[in-house]
Structure formats: structure tokens, C-alpha cells
Image (spheres, rainbow, N blue to C red):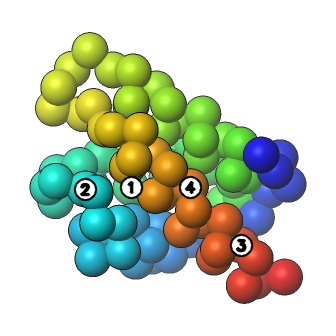
Amino acid sequence: MSSTEHAVTREDIERLVSRSRINTLESDNQAHTIREAVAKRRNGDGKISIQQIDEVLRKLENSKDRLVRISEYDRRGVVKVFEEYFQSKI
């Protein structure tokens, strides 16, 4: 997993993490939870790495709270979307 940080805006996060892009997400609540977690994890300069995204998503995947828990497939799907997005920016 890449630890290279990339700038990503809240708007980009909103656009990238949606049920239409990540088919495994079961609800808009899951998408919202993921968007908020990723947005909060960004550094003060608005940058985040794939490694950091995976880290925050693993916490959601392992959460005991079923309202915020996501599946392994959700995590993989979100990571893939961000990897593709960051690759397109190079």
C-alpha cells in the first residue's frame, strides 16, 4: 500500500464514495460514515495516502457497532476507487 499522500478535497471524497461507484455499499448511511472517516483522517493540508485510507476503513470493518461497520468488500472497493483516482492525478 502506498504511503504517498495526495491532496483530496471533501467534494472529491463525496463524489468518490457513493453507492453508484461502490456496489457493495448497502446504504447511504454506510457511504456517509466512510466519507466522514476519510475526511477526518486527512492531514491539515488535505492530504491522505492509500495506506491511511485503508487504516481508517479497517477500523470501520472491525467495529463492533453494526451501524458503522463495513464489509471487507466495502473496504476493498473504496481503496480501489481512491487508488484509481490518485493514479489519474499523476
Is residue 43 among the parts visible in the rendering?
no
Q: Nearer the viewer, mark 2 or mark 3?
A: 2
Residue 48 higher or lower than 81, as above or below: above
Q: Position of residue 73 (x, y in %)?
A: 39, 47
Q: Nearer the viewer, mark 2 or mark 1?
A: 2
Q: Amino acid at mark 4?
A: Val
Q: Element type at marker 4?
A: helix
What's the residue at 21%, 20% (across, down)? 65
Mark 2 to mark 1 CA distance (whole Å): 12 Å
Q: Is residue 27 left or right of residue 73?
A: left
Mark 4 to mark 2 CA distance (whole Å): 13 Å
Sequence-earlier tag: 4 or 1: 1
Which of 47/2 is in front? 2
Q: Element type at marker 3?
A: helix
Say few, some or many: other residues with alpha carbon within 10 Å of mark 3 (under 14 / 14 to 19 / 20 or more): some
To which residue does mark 2 refer?
Answer: 25
Image quadrant where one finds the C terminus: bottom right
Mark 3 to mark 4 CA distance (whole Å): 10 Å
Q: Is residue 72 left or right of residue 6?
A: left
